[in-house]
Image (cartoon, grey):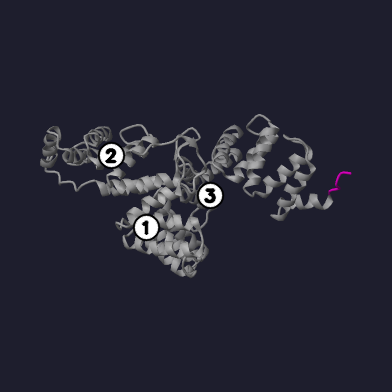
Amino acid sequence: MIKARRQPCPPPLRPRRPGAILAILILLQAPPIAAVYAGNGLDSRAATLERASKAGDLKARLDLANLYFNGAGGLPRNPRKAFLLYESAAEAGNPSAWFNVGLCYETGMGVDKNPEKAFECYGKAAEAGVPQAIFNLGICYKMGVPDGNGGCVVPPDLKMAESCFARLCEKAFFPAYREMATILFLKGGAENEKKAFALLKKSVAGGDPTAMRLMADCFRYGKGCERDIRESVEWLKAASKAGSAEATAKLAYCYERGEGTPVDSSRAARYWRMAAEAGLPAAEHKMGSLYAAGELGFQQDMAEARKWFERAAAHGNAKGFFALGLLALEGIGEEKNPKKAASLILSAAKLGEPHAQFNMGAFYSNGTGVAKDLQRAFFWYGQAAIQGDPKGMRELGFCYLEGRGTEKDFKRGMAWLAKAAERGDTPARRFLRDVTPPK
């Protein structure tokens, strides 16, 4: 049986978005649901499954759990009861039920989230050959399984992930083609890119919108094929039509910038809204920006802008937090509130937004919304500088030169100022032009 091993967890290879994958898998796993007869009672199938489940029929127990999970067959939606039925069927020997138990642990449906238990449940189902479980196990190996405390119960292991997906490719499990392709792209090299492109062609034949979006990326950047921006746009259209919010946002960008298609502000606005309404955090932030600036045909409306920034922040978007922080700082639509601004911008900084990191450096330098703390200012300037923010590089350089929050180091200070100047920072250029090295 596959066991998790607790280890330090390295950074993930790419952001993990299990929801879309898992939602598809639970639908694949769930059997067709019988139509509900008139009235509010159980339909005939649900009643039959109840009796068969109590009599020990494991398939009936799994089907009954699916009815409770989906709230179908005249039964109320009850994820907790569904989980208990899945668990009971699994422990009695139904391998497909182990997949559903793992899914519940992965997503916190009917039970507290527990990625380690999810991984082990997927392993049990995978050993029995359940394709969806093999797929999710591959995702676990590809991304690693965090323990929630900065550690990792399963570190990323591309070889194990590749083994899982290769096993599924042999069975023509379409989502596996896509995941195998992404591993080949990570490996790099012209031959791997050609193989990845060929796998994506198989995956799109199965109607996979994510694979369609990746095909668009291939044509945009010439990965495994000749670069063709117009063809990229056509794949974005197909992916958007198939339900990919990310493809819809990229299509909006193309119409806005005129990449691979003529500029069309009306379509750009429509696709940005579609992506935002589908819950894509980056598109939600973009909608806020459009309303704030009054662009692409949107009337300037700061209340509407705030609504979209709040939605983006609620979905964990760093730029959404940053935008809300700026509104609080400037007193737009509310009283000026430096403390609130600092709290919101700190949230964005912790999520890796470089402009927010620079601002936190400035806040701690000046005592804006927070207690003045030069060491913390030095830290946040450093975080912004590492991500290539020219202002962060400049201020980090001055911290070293002046000994603000760190020991003086003329050589390091000048090096960071030079990097800032290379990226076009005017104050850094002026300083370097006029500075006199110490004797």
Q: Residue 298: which disc?
A: none
Question: Is 438 within the magenta?
Answer: yes
The answer to whether residue 266 of the structure is visible from this angle is no
* Image location of residue 22, percent across then percent down: 34, 46
Q: Is residue 229 left or right of residue 277?
A: right
Pick whichever, 101 or 289, lies toward us: 101
What type is the residue that disc 2 sits on?
Answer: Trp
Q: Which quarter of the rendered picture does the C terminus lie within?
A: top right
What type is the residue that disc 1 sits on?
Answer: Tyr
Instruction: Kindly state the secondary structure of the residue where label 3 is placed.
Output: helix
* Image location of residue 207, percent across then percent down: 32, 60
Q: Residue 98: which disc?
A: 2
Disc 2 packing (10 Å; few <14; some 14–19; many ≥20): many
Q: Is residue 343 left or right of residue 196?
A: right
* Image location of residue 315, percent across then percent down: 45, 42
Q: Residue 177: which disc?
A: 1
**Which residue range is magenta in the image?**
435-439
Q: In whole angstroms, how far apart are the C-alphas of marks 1 and 3?
A: 42 Å
- Earlier in the chain: of badge 1 and badge 2, it is 2
Q: In whole angstroms, how far apart are the C-alphas of marks 1 and 2?
A: 24 Å
Q: Are marks 1 and 2 in contact (CB under 8 Å)?
A: no
Pick whichever, 399 or 218, lies toward us: 218
Instruction: Kindly state the secondary structure of the residue where label 1 is placed.
Output: helix
* Residue holding disc 3: 292
